[in-house]
Image: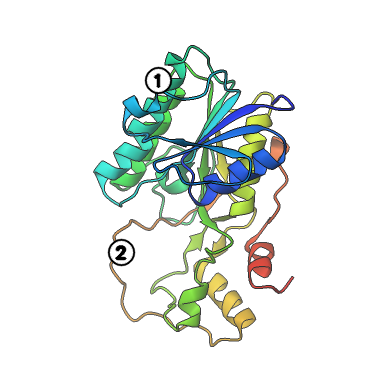
Amino acid sequence: MLAAMARLLIAGCGYVGVALAADLAAAGHRVWGLRRRPAPIARNVETLAADLADPRSLAGLPDSLDGAVYTASADAYEPEAYRRAYVEGPMNLAAALVARGGRPLRIVLVSSTGVYGRDDGGWVDEETLPEPNGFSGEILLEGERRLLAGSLPAVVVRFAGIYGPSRALFVDALRRGEARREPGPPRPINLVHRDDCVGILRHLLELEDPAQLYLGVDSEPVLRDELLDWLAVRLGLSLPVRASTKTGGRRARGSKRCSNARLLASGYRLRRPTFREGYADLLGTE
């Protein structure tokens, strides 16, 4: 359990990291946010300018941290960028924390359900063998394994597709008339609202005896076509038509249903249990 005024580091302040830092600071914790440029992050969050890919820049980390969360992401979809963000970055941070002479009670690493390469629409959980079908999943999995094998107490959370304020997946494409159903059998997708990303990460920092791995997903995988239709109806738009041919994407597209049973059993209660609650809020229809 975190102390009443814990000392916490958020390494990588992007879409999720900024919201998490603000949430923890509002709860009364002392929070440092690490990012490449020394720009303000949020109220009562202290900014650290450092590059996680450069070990020398991490010499000024705070002492006696109670916890750290690694939320950095790759700046390009290429192997080198993924390795910097998801292997070198976490290991550099862990080494810098150990070198400071103080060990945080816990370091939480944000990963992705993309480590599962399944394409049969079946269920996966923390016990399912990851079988990445591309470089991104392979590198994410390597980063997880190396951090968990290190000397710091570590927890990995694999998030699904993240949506939320300013990131309402599919909505802009529907409004532009560009959204299409995919050819072939309908494909299930897994989502998690940014509010729940924040809540899950805070929960894993506070949890007394966590497991090493959790899936951070909501409670209802949804068929992509079903979600498009649901959104179109609520936006007052025509239902999207099916694409005539398969479009070649740069990323491998899996087809799986992710279970959050372990997360819920640990005591976490979702703020947005399904896409309905999450999108109703974003569309102003609550």
* Residue 114 visible somewhere in the drawing: yes
Q: Quadrant of residue 36?
A: top left
Q: Amino acid at mark 2?
A: Gly
- Residue closest to the eye, 32 or 238: 32
Residue 110 vertical placement versus 178 (above, below):
above
Query: What x and y, as percent, mark residue 109?
Result: 49, 34
- Please tell me which residue is depicted at 44% across the width and 76% down the height of the picture: 181
Is residue 1 toward the left or the right of residue 42 in the image?
Answer: right
Residue 192 vertical placement versus 11 (above, below):
below
**Disc number at residue 95?**
1
Q: Quadrant of residue 229?
A: bottom right
Do tag 1 and tag 2 residues touch (Cβ < 8 Å)?
A: no
Q: Earlier in the sequence, mark 1 or mark 2?
A: 1
Q: Quadrant of residue 150?
A: top left
Decide: few, some or many residues near mark 1? Use Cα within 10 Å; few <14, some 14-19, many ≥20.
some
- Please tell me which residue is depicted at 32% across the width and 34% down the height of the picture: 53
Q: Secondary structure at mark 2?
A: loop
Query: What x and y, as percent, mark residue 218?
Result: 62, 53
